[in-house]
Image (cartoon, helix red, strand yellow):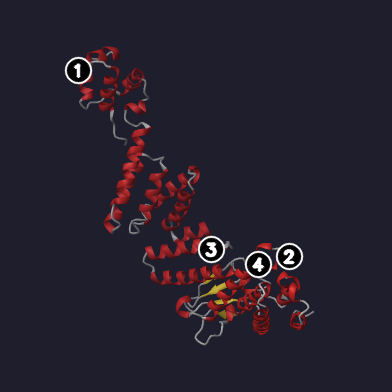
Amino acid sequence: MTELRIPEVILRERRKKGLTQEELAAQLGVSPQSISNWERGGYPDITLLPRIANFFGISVDELIGNDETNRKEDIKDFCKRFWSITETKQGFADRLSLAKEYYQKYPGDYEIMHALGYAIVNNMETIAQDADLMKEIHEKIMAGCTDEGYRRDSIHYMCYACTDEELEDRIGNSELDWSEAVSIGEIREDRYLLQNRIPEYYSQRNSNDLLIFMQYIGRNNMNYYKKEDAFVFAEPERTAAWELHKLRLLENFSDNGEVPEAWSGCYAEFTLKAAGALIGCGKIDEGFALLEKAFPLYERWLKIPDGSLMDAGCDTVFGGAKITKFDKESSTVHIHFQDGRKVWTPYLWLFWQLPGDIAVAMGQWRWFNSVKEDNRYTELYARAKKLAGK
């Protein structure tokens, strides 16, 4: 309960009005001994509180010490104490106890709810018994709190506090966008680590590493195939540097320098983009050399049947994962792990390079406009159309 501060408030307000105890007693219709008793730590009868508050021109909340200024100071003191506690096993337990105490005092304060949620998930040994409390504050935050940080953290805390079954019910196995897929994966990873579920933690970490790497190399991948994308084509120097960087990354994915099968399609596509960008910034010979290199890379990729399980390379980093080649019928790509786990990935565009890609690029990308009279362009464009089946 809120600490009652009636004695100090009555004393303060009496002095503000310049009254003696006897004069205040006469105004309130009580004995001077009652005023003396109240100011020394006693409490008036509850039925007298409205009369006393009205006489002083304050609210009952202010009379009992629950005014906004005192509340803010009390919560500020709580936060200072809470976050200064050392993050040890005992420290986390002390934080939880303190947060529960203040949640009882201020059950509607979101700052305290946020701290309580943090304390609950950092006490994994007792988290099961506090799961209902976590759900209670989560529902309050989601219903009324406008602070996006508190709302986001509350969702994460719920994922730690609920059971495995409840977690899957909440986040499901639906097809998420890249940010949701990575975020949910990291929640699972942290959950397994906090719960000391080490084999599951390593398996989830391998999955997260792959998803994050896919996002890194796959950003803005589709922009090159839009009919008009001035942002991409206006920066050939930057595009060339970025695509060449991605090529070097993939070339380091095996001991023999050959790009692993799973990445051979996007490696071919990055080679094509680097070629176009180099030509676009005037490095004509370098661009044509890379463009010619793109053909056998595409041919290698196109020989792999749709739906095949492909080696992702870097076994130590990715845990021996394999990736399915994009299947037009199911329109999905999954990561497969040695323990039998399968993870859906939203980065489909890294695994669906098509026979007509080079022909589309040479025919539509404005970078090639300046070399269309070059014999090398004529020969390679004919080869590209043949690869596309035209």
Looking at the image, the residue that sits furthest to the right is: 390
Three-letter amino acid code at the position of disc 4: Met
Determine crowd level at label 4: few under 14, some 14-19, many 20+ residues with C-alpha closer than 10 A.
Answer: few
In the image, 68: left or right of 278? left
Determine crowd level at label 2: few under 14, some 14-19, many 20+ residues with C-alpha closer than 10 A.
Answer: few
Residue placed most toward the observer, 362 or 261: 362
Three-letter amino acid code at the position of disc 2: Lys
Q: CA distance from mark 1 to mark 2?
A: 90 Å
Is label 1 or label 2 in front? Answer: 2
- Give the residue pinned by disc 4: 222
Q: Quadrant of the N terminus?
A: top left
Three-letter amino acid code at the position of disc 1: Gln
Q: CA distance from mark 3 to mark 1?
A: 70 Å
Q: Quadrant of the C terminus?
A: bottom right
- Give the residue pinned by disc 3: 181
- Give the residue pinned by disc 1: 33
